[in-house]
Amino acid sequence: MYLMGYIERVQPSLVARAACRTISSCGDCVANPTCAFDKTKFTCTVKSALVQQVTTTNACFLVQAMQKTQIQEFPATKTSTAGVIPSGVNKLFNDMQRHIFLGNPGDTTKGQHINTAWVPTNSGITKLIANDTSTHLAQYSFKSATASGIKTVWDNSRKDFYDQTDVRNIVPSRPGVLSVATPFNNNIWLTAVITGGDGTTCFPKSAHAVSQLLGYPC
C-alpha cells in the first residue's frame, strides 16, 4: 500500500517533467501551468521555488530576445547553446558584479545599482525622482558631502521584479549605451563601461522604456 501510494504521488511529477522537457519556447513553456523556463539553463522544466525561473509571458521577453539575437554584443547569440553565457562575457560580469550589487568600499554613492542596496545605504542623502512600473527601474537624486548626481537602479524589491540572473542576462559585452531587453516586454538604455577589473560596470541610463530595437546604440 505504501509503495502504491508513493508511485501515485511521484508518477504525475515524472510525467510533468518529461512533458516540460519537450518544450523549447519560453512562451509555450509558461503557457503550460506545470512548467516554467529556467533563467540559467534556458530550458523548460517543472515549476520549482528552488531555481530561478520565468513564469509569465512578459518575463519571456528578455529570454526570447537573447535566443533570437545574432548581435555579438550580447551574451546569448543564436547558437546551439543559446542562453549559455560565454566565459568571456561571464568574466566581464564577474568583474562588475561587486560594483553593481554591493558598491565600492569607502564611497556609498558608487555602484549599488539595485534598489535593496542603494536605498538602505543612502537613505539620508537620496530622494526618489522616478519610478517606472513598466520597466521596474527607479531613479534617485543624491547629494553627499563629496558627491551629487542621479542614480538609476534595477528594482529587486520583489521576487517578480529583477534578480541577479536577470541583470547578468542583460549585460552587453562591449562599452557604450545600447538598447537592451528587460524581462517586462520592453527595451531600455543600458550604459556599459568595459575597462577591466573594478572599473567595469553597467547600469540603466534612465528609468523609462525606449522604442529603439535591441542592440541599437544611443
Image (cartoon, grey):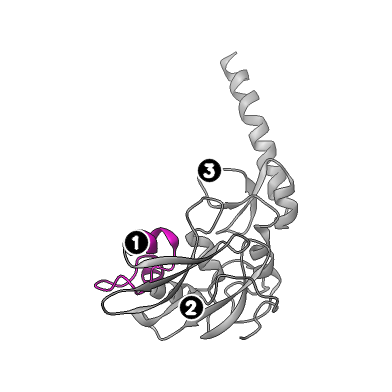
Q: Which residue is mark 1?
A: 123
Q: Can you tell which mark lies on residue 145?
A: none
Q: Residues within 10 Å of mark 1 (few under 14, many from 20)?
A: few
Q: Which residue is mark 3?
A: 49
* Left or right for 94, reference 7: left
Question: In the picture, residue 108 is in which quadrant?
Answer: bottom left
Question: Which residue type carries mark 3?
Answer: Ala
* Left or right for 63, reference 141: right
Q: Which residue is mark 2?
A: 88
Residue extent of the magenta highlight: 97-119
Q: Earlier in the sequence, mark 3 or mark 2?
A: 3
Q: Using the image as rendered, state which of residue 138 and residue 129 is in the foreground.
A: 129
Question: Which residue type carries mark 2?
Answer: Gly
Answer whether residue 98 is magenta in the image. Answer: yes
Question: In the picture, residue 116 is in which quadrant?
Answer: bottom left
Q: Is residue 167 above or below residue 3?
A: below
Q: Earlier in the sequence, mark 3 or mark 1?
A: 3
